[in-house]
């Protein structure tokens, strides 16, 4: 199956390994992955900060870049939610190709839960708000993780509570954002897991930032990176 | 004007930031959200109290809602009834006035807080009242009724237990339902011991912080007020257009004492409180208690329609207030906020509210609903109101919990745009608007983005931040590390991979 990858501006710039891992998983499952180089950003940061007109331009540019794509896969629940739920709000009547967050694509389209990964570590999963509430990915990421060989999944207390990133909220209300992040990191550390996993690089950037500052014994990894692993 | 000289009274930087203003200053004088939140976050006791209270009620609400198989239908029915009412509000208001008047009530109309207070004060003065008793009410707090009465030498006594704690503590409420949520038992005992005697029956000398003892002290203190006061003020949870009936829903029964014992009853009611028919209560008396106190049914529901000869207050007034509601109604996206039944479910699930409490919102209406309601009622010309839509991480927990399905995150986003437009209208170029435009320009073209990534990558170790995340450095790094910019962006890696593949293909 031919798949177009939308890497998202954040992963493109700061977390290229997430993109590489996404390609590894998709290719392993027999997909032909294409990366339309004209792509940039979904416009979420602009919409959520109060600049819907600027967001509209970015959404239209996304639509042009991916016009005709059979399926657009992206390793971010937040950006997928933006395109699925808010695109119409900023670019009226816009037509977009089908957009899937990675776990949705693997399970709903490819019908796979065992992606052939091996990762012998303890992991706890943070579902991230937009994946959880706007996209409703539900159990999908957990189902994928449970099939990973050697992986021990630990339940995260208060999993459905926000980590505090929230886009520009993280800088406009930095203290509140950090307080939320500190509680999330503490909950993750409390599980005794080595790794805190999520499907959004933005939330992970925030949590890694908090964990790093507090010297917490915790590593953050994107779901795609764990699914790509065969270690 | 509803909020006179607001800017003059908010002197940021010239006086220490206080989180517990004296009642005579109400919420005026509070700093804008980010500053107020910073102070609240530093208060460890406050954070512990809030965390305990919100988590307890959160779990209870989930149970109360979970046992209703038709909860989502009820929620949609509630939203639908409110929307229908708001769409024909003019007709329903007139219908209410006619029915209430026919039943012996006097209906007054107030365009703003000042007019509403003037009407209330005049009624109290006509009865030569020195003291009035009050049923817990958001509307009277919104218009600053206690302060207005006080200015005319009339003492307004709160009779709801939590409101009493707040009033005696010289404090302002920080929650709709649990106004003293930020106080613990020891603090309450101290407040009772210190203050009760100054304003009425004193607390017993041996008062402990045991809840039963605290409640008993409040009961005896309040009983004296109930039996000696002839004028009462209330709000209303619902107003029924069809019958002219007002409804107050409560847990303690203190409200019912105020609604039945005095000679004169004055109810201040927001025009959005209307429901078309008595039968509509069926839906709301299910969704409200389960969402607010996590009870299947609240202990006391008091309904009254005008005057009943020989029973209860013989002079009944209803003051219908606008105070910004028609402004909110005119907002296509925001008008859904007027569905709000003040249940406080959104406060209890909000991770931001949980950390900073109600005072940081600087308004009678805190939490997620306050973050949209205040800007909708007042506009976003004031810096204080303009900051509120940004006081959210947009996690969506509030929308999920709201029993009338107010899409709070969507309204927040819309009000953020309104705040940005307001600043642009006044030609205030902010660092943020410049950064946002620069980011949109960078994202407008993939080549420009690639160049920006390359620059960031070259600057590794020197300025390890990404220019298109506005204001990232200062706000971010005070409490978090920044990720290092990788040597190569994803797109640079991809083009290299593509080139290699092409070369390979050519060689073959």
Image: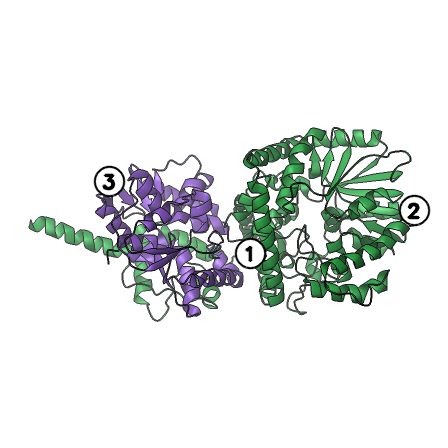
Tell which subunit mark 2 falls on.
Answer: B
CB atoms of marks 2 and 3 within 8 Å:
no
Q: Which residue is drawn at 67% across and 39% down?
A: B326
Look at mark 1 in the image and give the residue it sits on.
Answer: B352
Give the total of numbered labels: 3
Res. B59 visible in picture: yes
CB atoms of marks 3 and 1 within 8 Å:
no
Q: Which of marks 2 and 1 is nearer the N terminus?
A: 2
Do tags 2 and 3 sit on the same chain?
no
Is residue B12 placed above or below B134 in the rendered structure? below
Foreground mark, 2 or 1, reads 1
Query: Observer-nearest residue: B464 or B102?
Result: B102
Left/right of residue B94 with respect to residue A2 in the rendered view = right
In the image, residue B307 lies at what x, y percent?
86, 35
SS at mark 2 in the image? loop
Spatial distance from mark 2 to mark 3, Cα to Cα? Answer: 81 Å
Q: How dense is the environment of label 1, judged by Cα within 10 Å: few (below 14), some, or many (20 and up)?
A: many
Chain purple in the figure, letter: A
Is residue B205 placed above or below B80 in the rendered structure? below
Tell which subunit mark 3 falls on.
Answer: A
Chain green in the figure, letter: B
Left/right of residue B351 with respect to residue B107 in the rendered view = left
Which label number is shown at residue B127? 2
Query: Observer-nearest residue: A111 or B82?
Result: A111
In the image, residue B114 lies at what x, y percent?
78, 48
Which label number is shown at residue A2? 3
């Amino acid at each position: 199956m031919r798949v177009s990858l939308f890497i998202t501006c954040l992963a493109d710039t700061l977390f290229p390994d997430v993109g590489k891992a996404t390609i590894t998983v998709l290719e392993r499952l027999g997909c032909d992955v294409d990366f339309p180089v004209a792509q940039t950003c979904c416009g979420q940061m602009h919409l959520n900060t109060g600049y819907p007109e600027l967001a509209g331009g970015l959404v239209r540019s996304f639509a042009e870049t991916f016009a005709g794509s059979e399926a657009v896969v992206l390793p971010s629940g937040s950006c997928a939610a933006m395109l699925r739920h808010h695109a119409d709000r900023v670019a009226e009547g816009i037509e977009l190709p089908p957009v899937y967050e990675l776990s949705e694509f693997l399970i709903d389209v490819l019908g796979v839960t065992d992606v052939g990964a091996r990762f012998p570590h303890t992991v706890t999963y943070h579902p991230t708000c937009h994946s959880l509430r706007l996209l409703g990915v539900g159990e999908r990421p957990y189902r994928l993780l449970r099939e990973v060989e050697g992986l021990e999944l630990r339940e995260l207390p208060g999993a459905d509570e926000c980590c505090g990133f929230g886009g520009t909220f993280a800088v406009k209300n930095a203290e509140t954002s950090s307080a939320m992040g500190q509680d999330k990191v503490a909950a993750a550390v409390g599980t005794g897991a080595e790794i805190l996993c999520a499907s959004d690089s933005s939330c992970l950037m925030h949590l890694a930032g908090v964990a790093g500052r507090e010297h917490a014994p915790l590593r953050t990894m994107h779901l795609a990176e764990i699914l790509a692993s065969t270690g | 004007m509803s909020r006179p000289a607001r800017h003059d009274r908010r002197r940021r930087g010239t006086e220490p930031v206080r989180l517990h203003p004296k009642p005579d200053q109400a919420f005026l004088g509070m700093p804008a959200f980010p500053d107020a939140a910073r102070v609240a976050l530093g208060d460890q006791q406050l954070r512990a109290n809030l965390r305990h209270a919100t988590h307890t009620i959160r779990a209870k609400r989930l149970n109360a809602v979970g046992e209703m198989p038709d909860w989502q239908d009820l929620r949609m029915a509630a939203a639908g009834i409110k929307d229908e009412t708001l769409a024909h509000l003019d007709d329903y208001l007139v219908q209410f006035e006619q029915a209430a008047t026919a039943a012996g009530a006097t209906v007054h109309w107030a365009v703003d807080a000042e007019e509403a207070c003037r009407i209330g004060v005049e009624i109290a003065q006509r009865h030569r009242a020195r003291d009035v008793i009050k049923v817990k009410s958001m509307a009277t707090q919104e218009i600053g009724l206690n302060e207005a009465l006080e200015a005319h030498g009339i003492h307004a006594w709160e009779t709801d237990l939590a409101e009493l704690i707040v009033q005696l503590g010289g404090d302002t409420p920080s929650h709709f339902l649990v106004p003293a949520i930020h106080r613990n038992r020891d603090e309450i005992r101290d407040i009772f011991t210190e203050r009760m005697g100054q304003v009425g029956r004193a607390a017993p000398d041996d008062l402990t912080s045991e809840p039963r003892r605290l409640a008993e002290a409040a009961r005896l203190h309040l009983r004296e007020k109930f039996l000696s006061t002839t004028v009462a003020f209330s709000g209303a949870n619902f107003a029924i257009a069809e019958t002219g009936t007002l409804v107050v829903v409560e847990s303690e029964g203190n409200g019912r004492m105020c609604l039945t014992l005095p000679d004169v009853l004055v109810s201040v009611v927001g025009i959005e409180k209307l429901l078309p028919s008595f039968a509509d209560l069926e839906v709301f008396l299910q969704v409200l208690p389960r969402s607010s106190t996590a009870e299947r049914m609240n202990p006391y529901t008091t309904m009254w329609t005008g005057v009943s000869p020989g029973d209860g207050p013989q002079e009944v007034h209803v003051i219908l207030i606008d105070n910004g509601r028609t402004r909110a109604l005119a907002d296509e996206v925001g008008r859904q906020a007027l569905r709000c039944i003040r249940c406080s479910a959104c406060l209890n699930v909000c991770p931001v509210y949980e950390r900073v409490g109600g005072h940081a919102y600087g308004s009678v209406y805190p939490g997620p609903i306050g973050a949209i309601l205040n800007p909708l009622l007042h506009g976003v010309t004031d810096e204080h109101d303009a900051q509120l839509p940004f006081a959210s991480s947009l996690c969506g927990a509030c929308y999920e919990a709201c029993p009338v399905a107010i899409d709070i995150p969507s309204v927040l986003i819309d009000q953020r745009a309104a705040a940005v437009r307001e600043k642009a209208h006044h030609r205030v170029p902010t660092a943020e608007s410049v950064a946002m435009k620069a980011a949109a320009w960078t994202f407008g073209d993939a080549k420009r983005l690639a160049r920006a990534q390359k620059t960031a990558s070259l600057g590794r170790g020197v300025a390890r931040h990404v220019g298109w995340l506005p204001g990232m450095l200062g706000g971010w790094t005070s409490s978090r590390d920044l990720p290092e910019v990788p040597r190569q962006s994803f797109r640079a890696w991809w083009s290299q991979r593509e080139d290699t593949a092409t070369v390979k293909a050519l060689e073959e």
